[in-house]
Image (cartoon, helix red, strand yellow):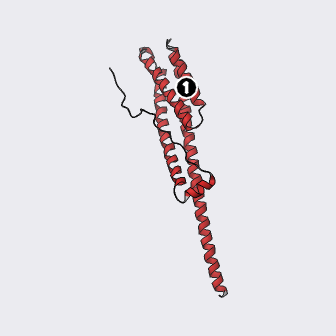
Amino acid sequence: MNNKGFISVGVVILVVILIALGGFFSLYNGLKEAEIRVDASYGQVENQMQRRSDLIPNLVNTVKGYDVHEKTIIEEVVNARAKLAGAQGVEQMDAANAELTGALGRLFAIAEAYPDLKANTQYLELMRELSGSENRIAVARRDYNEAVREYNVRISTFPGMFLAGFMGMTQKPQFKAKEGADAVPEVKF
């Protein structure tokens, strides 16, 4: 084989190596990008839950001003808020959020017994803000679940599963609806 033949074979091998390296780097970057997107989406869920949590002391103080006798419900709200603030990970955050949502529901039921409270502009503004926070939390959870779905697909399918396994990447948990969430609520008049 002459020099031109060796050069041609060398160029072909170099091109194949460059293509393989390009594919490896592209795959690696895609996996890391998906992982970062999951972390950022989780941070957004935390931000929205914190926003709602920050509104609760004002709501509790507004309700306290109406001499509500149901102090245990106010304590439940405060304790549930503290649990949410200390939650670590999706499962703990989900459980603490469900507890807080239940306690807030009981607090709102108290307001029904106090027409002056329901008409209070501060209370109405806080309720509007909490409602907006609930919507933002739902959107943030949806975005997080979509980022987790994309990430989990990338690390579970060919060829990403090989590199993900080597890098120690594992499936991320999604937020899930609570048991009984599909049941139609009973409305009584």
Label count reads 1
Counting from the top left corner in percent of width and height, residue 52 is at 53, 30
Which residue does the image show at 57% across and 54% down from the upper left?
31
Of residues 129 and 187, the one drawn nearer to the viewer in this rendering: 187
Which residue does the image show at 66% across and 88% down from the upper left?
2
Residue 40 shown left or right of residue 109 in the figure: right
Residue 39 shown left or right of residue 69 in the figure: right
Q: Secondary structure at mark 1?
A: helix
Residue 109 shown left or right of residue 31 in the figure: left
Q: Give the crowd class for mark 1: few <14, some 14-19, many >=20 residues within 10 Å.
A: many
Residue found at the far right of this picture? 3
Counting from the top left corner in percent of width and height, residue 106 is at 46, 21
Of residues 79 and 110, the one drawn nearer to the viewer in this rendering: 79
Which residue does the image show at 50% across and 30% down from the upper left?
98
Q: Which residue is labeled 1 in the image?
A: 80
Residue 130 seen in render: yes
Image quadrant for the N terminus?
Answer: bottom right
Q: In this picture, is 68 found above or below 81?
A: above
Image quadrant for the C terminus?
Answer: top left
Counting from the top left corner in percent of width and height, residue 100 is at 51, 27
Which residue does the image show at 56% across and 32% down from the upper left?
50
Q: In this picture, is 14 found above or below 62?
A: below
Residue 119 seen in render: no
Residue found at the far bottom of this picture? 2
Residue 127 shown left or right of residue 42 in the figure: left
Counting from the top left corner in percent of width and height, residue 175 is at 50, 39
Q: In this picture, is 8 found above or below 47?
A: below
Disc 1 marks which amino acid?
A: Ala
